[in-house]
Image (tube, rainbow, N blue to C red):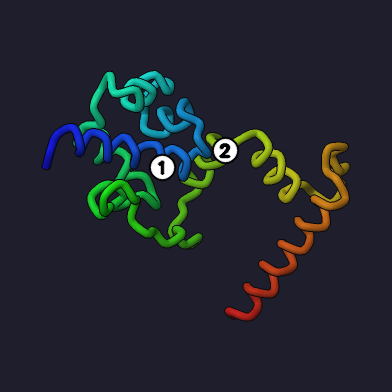
Amino acid sequence: MDEKLLAAQRRELLVKAIDRLTQGDRSAFGRRLGFKDGAFIRQMLSGARVVSDKTVRLIEAVPGMQGWFSQASGSEPPPLAPLPLTELSPTDIASRYHVAPKSAQRIVELALRQPQEPVPPWATPALLSVLAASLLLADDDNQSKS
């Protein structure tokens, strides 16, 4: 395969991987791969560095990203099923929480708050309603599988 075409395809797939894992946060993506920050990631995106086979292996080792580069056709990532909750380790859940945007972290904290804890002032009635409905649906789904 032409090296320039391969490099361009890998950069496109890298952008989509960043969007999938960290909602476009390059620094969080870099930390997720074990780098200090997103500088190395930005260099790959700009073309100053290539997306090497080593980097491809690092990304494909992240849960839910297996085959991201190797099974892709053209510049499209492979169709990936959501990672089943039973396969998520507490470490993976914690790492996903820490790289999630602050708004997503706040919603998780709202869902996990204890009944005696006050409702945060930013939690609108609409958000509370959606959260309550989601928890009820999850409970109904859980009971139907039992």
Q: Quadrant of residue 14?
A: top left
Instruction: Report the mark closest to the observer, 1 or 2.
Output: 1
Q: Is residue 33 left or right of residue 141?
A: left
- In-front residue for pair 80/115: 80
Residue 120's label in the rendered image is none
Label 1 to label 2: alpha-carbon separation? 16 Å
Q: Amino acid at mark 1?
A: Lys
Residue 86 falls left or right of residue 75: right
Residue 125 on image: x %, y %:
88, 50
Label 1: which secondary element: helix
Instruction: Quadrant for residue 3, please give it.
Output: top left
- Viewer-proximal residue, 87 or 64? 64
Measuring 66% from the left and 67% from the top, which residue is drawn there?
Answer: 138
Q: Is residue 51 left or right of residue 134?
A: left
Give the x, y percent position of residue 82: 46, 59
- Position in image of residue 141 (x %, y %): 64, 74
Of helix, strand and loop, which one carries label 2?
Answer: loop
The residue drawn where x is 52% and y is 42% is 96
Q: Nearer the viewer, residue 27 or 15?
A: 15
The C terminus lies in which quarter of the figure? bottom right
Residue on which disc 2 sits: 100
Q: Eyeballing the image, is 34 above or below 76?
A: above
Considering the image in quadrants, where does the N terminus appear? top left
Going 86% across and 43% down the picture, which residue do you hit? Answer: 119
**Amino acid type of disc 2?**
Ala
Q: Earlier in the sequence, mark 1 or mark 2?
A: 1
Residue 62 in percent (x, y) is at: 36, 44
Q: Number of callouts in the render? A: 2
At 52% from the left and 46% from the top, the residue drawn is 93
- Please rate how many residues cluster around mark 1, counting C-alpha atoms within 10 Å: few if below 14, some from 14 to 19, many from 20: some
Residue located beneath label 1 in the image:
16
